[in-house]
Amino acid sequence: MAALLGPSGSGKSTLLTILGSLMQPTSGAHVMLGEDLIAADDRALTEFRNAHIGFVFQFHNLLPDFTALENVIFPTAVREGRETAVARARGRDLLARMGLAERIHFSATHLSGGQKQRVAVARALMNSPELVLADEPTGNLDRLSAMQVMELIGQINREEGTTFLISTHDDQIASLCRRRIVVGDGKVTG
């Protein structure tokens, strides 16, 4: 688990966007898991992201008309072209691990902010990615909800070996990470 730190406008979100292959860098190389992500076409990048990278955003970006379970299994349904029983079972398991077993069939609009963020974490983990990029994942949560989300992230990191890169302004959140990466003026400074 690594914390990505720096003031607003320092380039944290841009770095996460590039690492997630959602934006190309202006120069340099971008190789992840042996794949040249600069040379890859849009389809290859989409498949790579779906298979290897999970995203958690500050505003969770859930589909409001979908249930918690539907939001979680969406990445797999896109990859498979349909919902499957295996995906539904994994989605239910992830939601249970997030403490949301009784909220599985609630629409996103009927969940609290902390619950929505836990659904977003479960969705990011759905395809068992090697890397989860989290951009201010606790920024809109109260302290208790933020600590619950971080506890779950830490548990997944320890148990499944998933790497998390977490952009944050919160020193308490950063202290829960094993490494700190500092960005300033678009450069890694520490």
Image: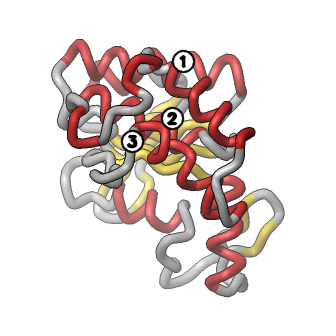
Q: Which mark is residue 39?
A: none
Q: Nearer the viewer, mark 1 or mark 3?
A: 3
* Quadrant including the N terminus: top right
Q: Is residue 131 above or below residue 18?
A: above
Q: Which residue has dot 3 on it? A: 67
- Mark nearer the N terminus (1 vs 2): 1
Q: Which mark is residue 97?
A: 1
Q: Residue at x 47, y 76 (%)?
A: 23
Q: Residue at x 62, y 57 (%)?
A: 77
**Amino acid type, label 1:** Arg
Q: Are marks 2 and 3 in contact (CB under 8 Å)?
A: no
* CA neighbours of label 1 inside 10 A, class few (<14), some (14 to 19), many (20+): some
The percent coordinates of residue 28 (x first, y second) are 60, 78
Q: Residue at x 42, y 20 (%)?
A: 100
Q: Nearer the viewer, mark 2 or mark 3?
A: 3
Taking the image as shown, residue 187 lies to the left or right of residue 159, namely left
Residue 175 shows in the view: no
In terms of image quadrants, where is residue 81?
bottom right
Q: Residue at x 21, y 60 (%)?
A: 9
In terms of image quadrants, where is residue 182?
top left
The percent coordinates of residue 141 (x first, y second) are 20, 28
Q: Are marks 1 and 3 in contact (CB under 8 Å)?
A: no
Counting the numbered discs, the total is 3
In terms of image quadrants, where is residue 27?
bottom right
**Amino acid type, label 3:** Thr
* CA neighbours of label 2 inside 10 A, class few (<14), some (14 to 19), many (20+): many
Q: Which residue has dot 2 on it? A: 122
